[in-house]
Image (spheres, helix red, strand yellow):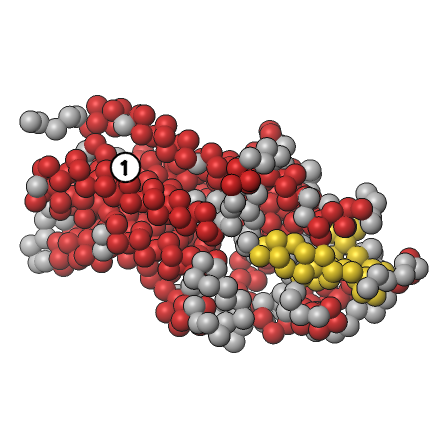
Amino acid sequence: MPKPSGRRSLLALTPAWALLALLLLPCAWSADWGADESTLLWEATSLARGGLIYQDFFTFLPPGAAGLLAAVFRVVGPGLAAAHGLAALLALLVAALLALFAHWQGLRGPATLVPGALYVGLVVWPNPTYAHHGVALAFGLGALAAGMRGLDGLAWGWWALAGGLAGAALMTTQTDGLLALAVLGAGLACAVRLRICSARAAARGALAVGAGVVLPLLVTVAWLASAGLLGDAWRQAYLWPLAHYKRAGGFNDVKWLTDLPGLLSPATPAWHGLLHWYARVVVVLAPYVLVAGVPLGAIARALPVLVRRDAAGGLQEARFALLALAALGSLAVCLGGRADYLHTIAYATPAVAVGAIWAWSRLAQVDRGLEAVLPLLGLAVAGAASLVVFGTTMRLDPGAWLDLRSPDARVAAQPALAYLRDHTGPADRVIAAPWGGLFYRCVRAPATRYTLITPPSYLYQDGADRRAIDADLHSGAATYVIVASELPPEQAVLAVFGHPLPGYRFEVSRPLTFHGRPLPQHFFRRVELGITPVR
């Protein structure tokens, strides 16, 4: 029996896509939050209220992720539901792009859904938060899809679109955007190597990519220049990361292979069993890779075609080679960074997608009957695993599903936030460390532009940063200084700031649930207010 046409095959899966979208609804209503997300949400809230990036708050990221979320906040209002809803839409877009990649490799029917469903079920569900890497992943895979489409006749318009999307990724996360551009360049080289086009045609395609990249860059530069922020943007988003993000001996001076064993060691103070959020790297990636197939096996299929002297191939081979190169680049970046959940998932997704497409296409060649049965089995395994991972890592109980309050209402009811709201007024300002975004967004405005304040031992903020933070502390503008730590209050202050807090006195500790466990928040109140500390 002949296979249905590509368009009919995709339309026939409309009910399945609707079901996938329905499965993302709990993610949009989740009250879980992460440290990086709380910072990003505060930045987007500030922008939506008329604040200025790089001036009202310090950030080493380009404005893409915060700006996109701020635009959504201006329409629907700021809040966790809006942020998680946008994250769910981006996840659905990533799933659709992965399905398109599978379709272009000859898969049809339910098999095209496998990579995307695995991404949603085993990646998004355990951590349904809005993150800059998630935004950049959508832009980067979009650039990859446009590049794959552009290989058909080397259409300049598609390569210009690919460059524009890669530029958008660059304006979201520096590393992700550079990776997308490198992959597009390698894809054009593959087209020449496989004799799909001439070197001159590939050069014209590269010019189209460059023209596409210029548009988002020009829009961003013009916007920053009009607000007088271009110099601050250059210093914070480009010079600062080059000088400090990977500083020798600092917090981010780690590699994936050397970082992972320490994170999973029972001797690690933060260890709380296999389902601790650090261990999601293993909990999630293990079934993800096993069900999808081994990515390296798929990459091994593409590379020999490129290295043969008589290399030649068709459009399908060139597209798969482009996808394999993206997988290789992503894995290389992943292995050069921290072995946490966010970075691993962001960079491993293209590689695992390659493995899924390769595995199912091989099964289809072995037995046509398996093509219909095994994808459904894979989806069932992914669905069951996602329920287990979601339920355990999110620490959900049956009552949580019956809580009809908005995510922000559930977060705002936490003891630490409620205490600050009850003991301050609208004019009061606070400083919270290390992550202040949640306090600033939900309760009171900050008395510092540093939303993230790390311990000096991290070597994350340089001398100028530390002096600026100390000046904010000594100015007395903050009614409260709040320090999150499991250490006793005075020790926590020394660990985070490196010195005591003159003019402030410990008042009380209140918990704030963070990654499924209560983390004490130590409140230090300004002494001038004459408040008797509560022990």
Q: Is residue 485 left or right of residue 65?
A: right
Residue 121 visible somewhere in the drawing: yes
In the picture, which quadrant includes the N terminus?
top left
| Picture coordinates of residue 389, whole percent (x, y) | 41, 50
Residue found 23% across the figure and 38% down from its top? 376
Q: Residue furthest front?
A: 398
Determine whether the residue tagged by mark 1 lies in a helix, strand or loop.
helix
- Amino acid at the residue labelled 1: Leu
* Classed neighbour count for the residue bearing mark 1: other residues with Cα under 10 Å, few (<14), some (14–19), many (≥20): many
Q: Dot 1 corresponds to which residue? A: 113
| Picture coordinates of residue 29, whole percent (x, y) | 53, 37
In the picture, which quadrant includes the C terminus?
bottom right
Q: Quadrant of residue 106?
A: top left
Residue 208 visible somewhere in the drawing: no
Q: Is residue 147 left or right of residue 86?
A: left
Viewer-proximal residue, 324 or 130?
Answer: 130
